Amino acid sequence: KNQVEQSPQSLIILEGKNCTLQCNYTVSPFSNLRWYKQDTGRGPVSLTIMTFSENTKSNGRYTATLDADTKQSSLHITASQLSDSASYICVVRGWDSGYALNFGKGTSLLVTP
Amino acid sequence: EAGVAQSPRYKIIEKRQSVAFWCNPISGHATLYWYQQILGQGPKLLIQFQNNGVVDDSQLPKDRFSAERLKGVDSTLKIQPAKLEDSAVYLCASSFRQGGSYEQYFGPGTRLTVT
């Protein structure tokens, strides 16, 4: 069973609008959580990384939040641009998973004009 | 700083044929990873190297997949013989050291289609 679940599976929004992507995980104990952006035909690129003691982390128009108690994270995109169209992947590392990362299936975001 | 390089970018083969992928990590990165990403899913770790030693290959189908990193730099991943279900993007990533605090940098991937 996948220990990282993302929702929605896909999302279409108009350029300029905001959106929020969700990530729920069961990985425990928890070490850190990353959000990656993966453009079509490219490898994932890290947007943010948060440890259990961090509640929020921003990277430009991207803001990630983390609630380690409820094991939930969100990625908020402000004033979306066409270039934000991509897959967004939540990745969680636990202390007892060696050095392996637990990947979600991703949310596919399409920003339309 | 040059990124992770992979080749080829695309490969189409028939089932039961063999194929090899090449990866050149970021200079100085000791840890190298191979992932398989099936369409619509997140990457799945196949094998992890620390220098030229294998750290984790628990999810590598060893009856048909093999990987090596002989000199602790470049790496090759081979599939022999290929099956239809091997159709996926094969991503190579590298990090300065192993451990969750070190960021993994991904290459562009090799898209494999098995017909």
Image (cartoon, helix red, strand yellow):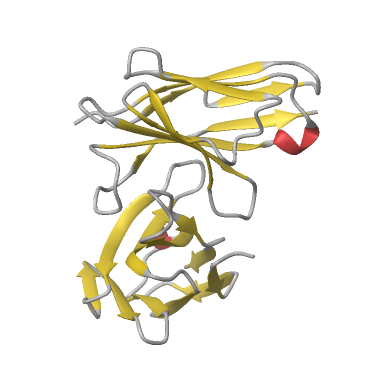
Q: Position of residue A28 (x, y in %)?
A: 43, 71
Q: Residue at x 24, y 80 (%)?
A: A55
Q: Position of residue B72 (x, y in %)?
A: 32, 19
Q: Position of residue A2 (x, y in %)?
A: 59, 64
Q: Height in image: A66 above or below B40? A: below
Q: Quadrant of the N terminus of chain B?
A: top left
Residue B18 or B72: which is nearer the viewer?
B72
Q: Residue at x 63, y 55 (%)?
A: B40
Q: Residue at x 40, y 50 (%)?
A: A98
Residue A17 or B21: which is nearer the viewer?
B21
Which image quarter: residue A74? Answer: bottom left
Q: Height in image: A75 above or below B12? A: below
Q: Quick check: can you spot residue B60?
A: yes
Q: Quadrant of the C terminus of chain B?
A: top right
Seen as rendered, the residue at the extreme bottom is A70
Relative to A100, B42 lies left or right: right
Which image quarter: residue B81? Answer: top right
Q: Quick check: can you spot residue B108?
A: no
Q: Height in image: B76 above or below A113? A: above
Q: Position of residue A96 (x, y in %)?
A: 40, 59
